[in-house]
């Protein structure tokens, strides 16, 4: 029984960690996407000028 409780605790911890990662990316995705888009636009604009 003690071993089963340990496995359950690890499962709960894993689910919480995965949830935290999902929430992190959900919260910061717009910022990340805008940064990548801005850098991409700047890079392609500079190539056209050269």
Image: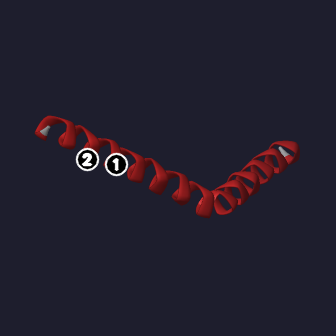
Q: Position of residue 50 (x, y in %)?
A: 83, 43
Q: Nearer the viewer, residue 32 or 9?
A: 9
| Tag shown at residue 12 | 1
Query: Can you tell which quarter of the image residue 25 is in?
Result: bottom right
The residue depicted at 66 percent of the width and 63 percent of the height is: 31
Q: Where is residue 48 in the image (x, y as percent from the top left)?
A: 87, 44
The residue depicted at 86 percent of the width and 48 percent of the height is: 49
* Apparent side of residue 23 relative to residue 20 in the rendered image (left or right): right
Q: In the structure shown, which secondary structural element does the residue marked by tag 2 occupy?
A: helix
- Count up the numbered dots: 2
The 10 Å Cα crowd at callout 1, few under 14, some 14 to 19, many 20 or more, is few
The residue depicted at 72 percent of the width and 59 percent of the height is: 34
Query: Can you tell which quarter of the image residue 32 is in?
Result: bottom right
| Tag shown at residue 9 | 2
Give how far apart the Cα atoms at labels 1 and 2 are: 5 Å
Mark 1 and mark 2 residues within 8 Å of each other at the beta carbon: yes
């Amino acid at each position: 029984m003690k071993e089963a409780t340990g496995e359950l605790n690890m499962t709960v911890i894993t689910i919480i960690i995965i949830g935290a990662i999902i929430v992190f990316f959900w919260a910061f995705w717009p910022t990340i996407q805008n940064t990548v888009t801005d850098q991409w636009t700047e890079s392609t604009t500079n190539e056209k000028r050269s």
